[in-house]
Image: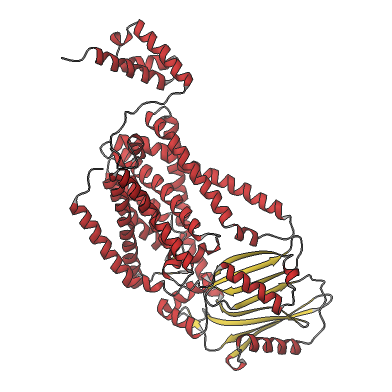
Amino acid sequence: MSKISTKTWLIFLGLSFFSVLVWKQFTAPQLSFINLSVSKNSALKIASTYLTEKSGIQPADLKSYHSAIVFTSRDTSDQYLQKAIGFKKELEYFKEHDFELFYWTIRFFKENQKEEYRVTVSAGSGEVTAYSHVIEASAFRPPQTEDEAREKAIAFLKEKFNFDPALWAPQTNNSQKYERRTDFSFAWEKSDSKVFWSKEPDTGWAIISTGVSVSGDEILGFYKNNLKIPDQYQRYMDKIQNVGRNLSTLFRICFYFILTAAIFHVLLNRNSIVMHSVKKFGVALTGCIFAAHIASYFNSFQSIIFNYPTTSSMSLYIWQNIVSVTMDTFITVLTILMPFLAGEAIHRETFPERKEGAFLHYLRSTFFSRNVTGAILIGYLSAVIMIGIQTLAFEFGQKYLGVWTQYSWMAQLSDSYSPLLAAFIIGVTAGFSEEICFRLFGINIDKKFMKNTFLACLIASVVWGYGHSGYLVFPMWFRGLEVTLMGLFLSYVYLRFGIIPVITAHYLFDVFWDSSAYLLGQAPATDFYASLTTLLLPLAFATVAFVMNKKVAERPLRWHLNIHQLFNLEVLKDYLQRHNLLAKKSAEQLKHEIAAHGWDLSVVEMAIEDLTAKKNTSHPEK
């Protein structure tokens, strides 16, 4: 990459500044409502205390239970309210009806036993908002009438949540009779909380409900302020999500075609010196991604344990999960390695003048130069511009195309032991895998066959964009359009500045959004600083490269031979010299003739290259 001009820096800085302004104006206000003040450890303590104080479990007995804690969010409620009343009114609705989106759910259980407890704790206030005690069907509870059970339920809600029956209408009364007890469930609807989602008649409405389950003298379970979604809306959502599923299916077909093309190219050109030169780096890179995926599995181990069915052995359940994840990850890294090898080889054919567009240039020179520092800084500015593109796309879509989305996904990494590690792994994996597949390989393979750079960028961007159609952005086709626009911008950055800026930008974009709940919402300070640190990691590498400032000088592109190949090399060179074959035949003719007799092409090419260089040195042209 040639030195970046002052004009270019000013343009990127100007676009970044504009992107920050539009993001602050339109998007930032929609993120500040996220409240994750209660940490995972605090929620676990609150749940444990609740069980020992309210459910009669002794602290010593509680220690005999396994526990697993996961982060939960009311995604469907978030979608519904944004669709029905818009984001601003949704926030007003939250305040008016004491409604929250984010919770910790803690499960206490024993292996091979049905009885267990689940406690839900608000991630914002720390209040216990739901509880359930699962017991054996044969468990005994003292008999009671339905009226007695209802009185107990109302008394409990009054004490727990200041429940006012005058504001709530009875919704359902259910009873479940067992051999030695009868369980009663009651639910009430909050009269002034109706939200219609459609102007069409008979499409239903959402309403806030609260419920309690009673068995004998025990409160078996309760929940506070759930939003009951109408069945018609659920059917409507299933219908429109089919569009996203169809687009995702089409993307998978395109991706399999891309992967097949990459594998075919690798097999057809397996003796390519470019692939030979980058092979070790590619294997090391995909090996790191493999390790990152496995680390991600263990980082989210709580969610694995949370879903453990107590009817089976826990050790067997965990072992099955590990084997499944390992196999899936192995296949995933192969889908990265093949496009990497093929993309490196094809790039040298299609864009030989743009050396920074492939890793080969840095492997032959250095990753620690001020050119790399500049490339990473361009990546930072590009990430900010991508956020600006996304903001403008959504602002236009929300105003003129009826676009709506959900924001609860931004806290999805809270399940992890370390949200920092989770965000880092997502950023690294997506940054490398998608930029290798759709920029390094996708653009180059399209350019090779179509001979048109813009068309190559457009096709790669569309396939990449609509691969994101499964995200819950409505209408479902809009997410693909938005990502396609960012893909076209990344394509320009790739062709102008190389592979490092687009990987950096992609990494930063993903890490920013996956950490946004901790950066912009209310969250523990440790999560804020951990997220900020993750965003600064590429800058740390850029600083090291700036200080080291190694000279950018490409080393000759040569085969790396093992000990047996080196022995054969000397044998072949001796044979060619004794018979003076280089004087009798051209290098290309010799190469094909000797390789046709079973000789390793890398050995043949290096022998001819060494003897030619020796001849030119001994008899320089005058």
Query: How far from the left and from the top, in percent, is residue 128?
Result: 61, 77
Residue visible at 39% across and 63% down?
478
Query: Residue 26 occupies which quadrant of the picture?
Result: bottom left
Identify which residue, 460 or 27, lies in the foreground. Answer: 27
x, y percent for residue 614: 29, 15
The colouring scheme, among rainbow, by chain, secondary structure or one colour, is secondary structure
Q: Is residue 17 above or below residue 80?
A: above
Q: Is residue 409 visible?
A: no
Q: Quadrant of residue 354?
A: top left
Q: Residue furthest top?
A: 579
**Residue 422 can be seen in this image:** yes
Say left or right for 444 vs 218.
left
The residue lying toward the viewer, choosing from 207 and 546, is: 546
x and y percentages locating residue 530 in the rendered image = 46, 61
Q: Is 576 on the left or on the right of 333, as rendered?
A: left
Left or right, 393 with respect to 36, comes to left
Image check: 115 left or right of 322? right
Quadrant for the N terminus in the image: top left
Which quadrant, please, contains the C terminus?
A: top left
Q: Residue at x 32, y 55 (%)?
A: 380
The image shows residue 621, relative to residue 343, as above or below, that is above
In the rendered image, the residue lying farthest to the bottom is: 166
Quarter-of-image position of residue 608: top left
> x, y (%) of residue 58?
75, 73
| Outermost front residue | 547
For the residue pair 518 and 578, the one nearer the viewer reads as 518
